[in-house]
Amino acid sequence: MPLAAMSEAVLNINTADSDALVEDLVGVGPQKAMAIVRYRQQHGPFKQVDDLALVDGIGAKTVEQNRTRMTVAEPKGGK
């Protein structure tokens, strides 16, 4: 059942574009998604999922709601 496995994949918040952020994260609309992308462009990649709360408009509640949906890890085999 590859489709089921794909639907449970986590989103890398260091590489996701704003559309993916809106689609995959609870409580993140277009404005918050753009703020995440801007923050990442200005400050570099997130080191841990909790760093998402450093973005204006993103609070600890949003991070907690999405914790299992997000990663900052490089894909296996990638550098």
Image (cartoon, helix red, strand yellow):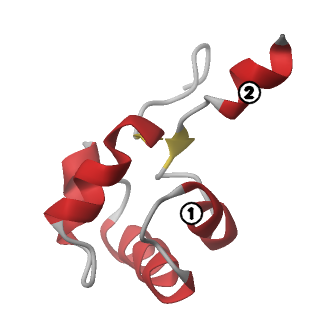
Answer few, some or many: residues within 10 Å of disc 1's Cα (few below 14, many 20 plus, some between 14 and 19). Answer: many
Give the residue type that dot 1 points to.
Answer: Leu
Question: What is the secondary structure assignment of the residue under circle 1?
Answer: helix
Disc on the earlier residue, 1 or 2: 2
Give the percent coordinates (x, y) of residue 65: 31, 52
Picture quadrant where residue 47 is located = top left
Give the residue type that dot 2 points to.
Answer: Met
Give the percent coordinates (x, y) of residue 63: 26, 55
Question: What is the secondary structure assignment of the residue under circle 2?
Answer: helix
Picture quadrant where residue 42 is located = bottom left
- In this rendering, is residue 19 above or below 26? below
Give the percent coordinates (x, y) of residue 77: 61, 13
* Disc number for residue 48: none
Residue 26 lies left or right of residue 60; in this view the side is right
* Disc number for residue 21: 1
Residue 29 lies left or right of residue 67; in this view the side is right
Answer few, some or many: residues within 10 Å of disc 2's Cα (few below 14, many 20 plus, some between 14 and 19). Answer: few
What residue do we see at 61% from left, 29% from top? 8
Q: In the rendered image, which residue does mark 2 sit on?
A: 6
What residue do we see at 40% from left, 67% from top? 40
What residue do we see at 15% from left, 62% from top? 60
- In this rendering, is residue 33 above or below 3? below
